[in-house]
Image (cartoon, grey):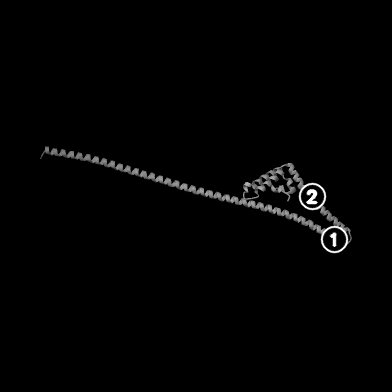
Amino acid sequence: MEVDHYAILGLPSGVQGAKVSHENIIKAFRLQALKLHPDKRRDDPDAHKNFLRLKNSYEILKDRQSRKAYDDVVRAKHEKIIQDLKRQEMMARKKAELVMKKGRDEDERKMMYDLKKEKELVMKKVRDEMETRRCDMMNDFKMKKELAMKKVRDIQRKRQEMMDILKKQKEVAEKKARDEIERMRKEMMDTLRKQKEEAEKKARDEIERMCQEMMTHLKKKRELAEADLEKERKRQKMNPG
C-alpha cells in the first residue's frame, strides 16, 4: 500500500496535502510526535515502528525538494487516475457511438452489453477504491479513538493516584496535628500542675509564716502578761492590805 505521508502527520491527504504550508507541517509533526512518542506509549508494541514511520514522513515533507518530488508523484498518480477514467469514458462513448452507427440490432446489443459490463467494472473499481479508503479512514478513526480512550484512562489513573497521595498527606497532617495538640495539652497540663504545686507551696509557706508570726506575737503578749502579773504580785507584797 502506498504510504500517505500527509495522512501520517494528520494532514489532508493526496493533492490537498500539497497546499499545506511548511510551518503547518512542522506543527503537525510536533503534535503527532508528542502523541506517538514511545515513552508515552509503552504499552503499544508498535509504538517504536509508528514513531519511526512518523519521523520518516516528516523527513520527506520538511525537505522542500523531497516534498516536491513526493507531491509530483502524488499529483501524477492523481492525474493518471483522472486520465484513465476519462479514457475509459471516452472509449465507452466511442463504443456507444459505434453501436449507434451500426444498424444491426445484434451488434448493438452486444456493444451495449460490453458497455454495460465495462461500466460495471469501472463502477466496481470505483466502489472498491472508495471502500478501501473508507476502511482506511475507519481504521485511522478507530486508532485515534483508542488513543483518546487510553489518554482518558491515563488521566483518570493519574487523578486517582493524586487523590490517594492527597488522602495520605491529609491523614499524615491530621495525625501530626493530633499529636501536636496532644503534646500541647500535656505541656499545658504539666504547666498547670506545676503552677498549682507552686501555688499550694506558696500558700503553705504563707500560712506557715503567718502561724509563726502569730505564735511570736502570742508569745510576746504572754511574756508581757506574765511580766505585768509579776509586777502586780510584787506591788501587793509591798503594799499588803
Count of labels in the image: 2
- Where disc 1 sits, the SS reads helix
Question: Quarter of the image holding residue 204?
Answer: top left
Q: Residue furthest left?
A: 241
Residue 60 appears left or right of 223: right
| Label of residue 238 in the image | none
Label 2 neighbour load within 10 Å: few <14, some 14-19, many 20+: few
Q: Camera-side residue: 50 or 189? A: 50
Q: Camera-side residue: 202 or 50? A: 50
Q: Position of residue 109 (x, y in %)?
A: 85, 61
Q: Residue furthest bottom?
A: 106
Instruction: Look at 51% across and 49% down and name the residue there.
Output: 168
Q: Position of residue 120 (x, y in %)?
A: 79, 58
Q: Position of residue 219 (x, y in %)?
A: 22, 40
Distance between the alpha carbons at the discs numbered 2 and 1: 29 Å
Quadrant location of the C terminus in the rendered image? top left
Label 1 neighbour load within 10 Å: few <14, some 14-19, many 20+: few
Instruction: Look at 79% across and 57% down and name the residue there.
Output: 121
Mark 2 or 1 closer to N-term? 2
Residue type highlighted by circle 1:
Lys
Residue 21 appears left or right of 235: right
Q: Position of residue 217 (x, y in %)?
A: 24, 40
- Where disc 2 sits, the SS reads helix
Q: Which residue is mark 1?
A: 110
Q: Which residue is mark 2?
A: 80
Contact, mark 2 vs mark 1 (Cβ under 8 Å): no
Residue type highlighted by circle 2:
Lys
